[in-house]
Amino acid sequence: MTIRAVIFDFGGVIVRTEDQSPRLRWAERLGVTPAVLGATVFDSEAAAQATVGRIPAAAVWAHVAAAFKLEADALAQLRADFFSGDRCDEALVAFLRGLRPAYKTGILSNAWSDGRDIIGGKFALADAVDDLVVSAEVGMAKPDPRIYELATTRLGVRPEEAIFVDDFARNIDGARKFGMQAVHFRDRTQAIADVQALLTYGE
């Protein structure tokens, strides 16, 4: 087994919500639990449709506005605050950048229509990898095996030649069923060690 590529998930791995206080404040303001607020944003049918590009990101926020009866100004503030606690793991990005040129690298993200702008613009990661696959742009999402096939094909490698890192067990399971090597992200130190172990094993 020779590893030729390493592919990382984005949200929950490279960028994580380290400061929950903005969401906690909004949950209190709306009279719901943080779990309900999170589910309204991420687990709705609108979010599922946006993840595969059938509706734009704005439609998810329209759903959130309707659910909580928010006027436009309040929705705009919630939308800004909701992700304000997100932090980019610069050490993990440095590790990812450092894998090149020995390995091809990629980001594979279940993200809405604004995903590329967030990943490449807000967090300036466009040049950190060889390829970026955003689910909304390609009409499929993890753990659909077709998206793993797309990601590996675009990098020019076979499934068994690629390592995939993700924080959701179902996405890891999907990658493994497709034939990829996979690392279940729990924290930076563990993930880097597990990737390095696979790279060493594959030499």
Image (tube, grey):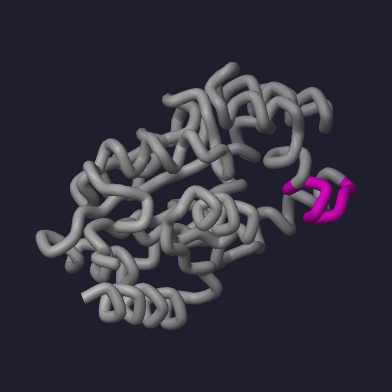
* Residue 144 in view of the camera: yes
Find residue 202 and report its horizontal and vertical position in percent: 27, 73
Splitting the image into 4 quarters, where does residue 14 fall? Answer: bottom left
Q: Nearer the viewer, residue 44 or 68?
A: 44
Figure check: 6 above or below 119: below
- The quadrant of the rendering that contains the N terminus is bottom left
Q: Nearer the viewer, residue 58 or 5?
A: 5
| Residue 12 appears left or right of 157 | right
Find residue 150 and report its horizontal and vertical position in percent: 38, 35
Q: Nearer the viewer, residue 39 or 166?
A: 166
| Residue 163 appears left or right of 172 | left
Q: Is residue 48 magenta?
A: no
| Residue 35 appears left or right of 195 | right
For the point 25% across and 54% down, the residue is 105
Splitting the image into 4 quarters, where does residue 162 fall? Answer: bottom left
For the point 42% across and 63% down, the residue is 181
- The quadrant of the rendering that contains the C terminus is bottom left
| Residue 135 appears left or right of 159 | right
- Most extreme residue toward the right is 31
User: Which residues are the magenta region?
Assistant: 31-38
Find residue 76 and report its horizontal and vertical position in percent: 60, 31
Find residue 174 and report its horizontal and vertical position in percent: 57, 50
* Residue 85 in view of the camera: no
For the point 46% across and 44% down, the residue is 109
Q: Nearer the viewer, residue 68 or 154?
A: 154
Give the main secondary structure, helix, strand or loop, of the magenta stretch. Answer: helix
For the point 59% across and 57% down, the residue is 173
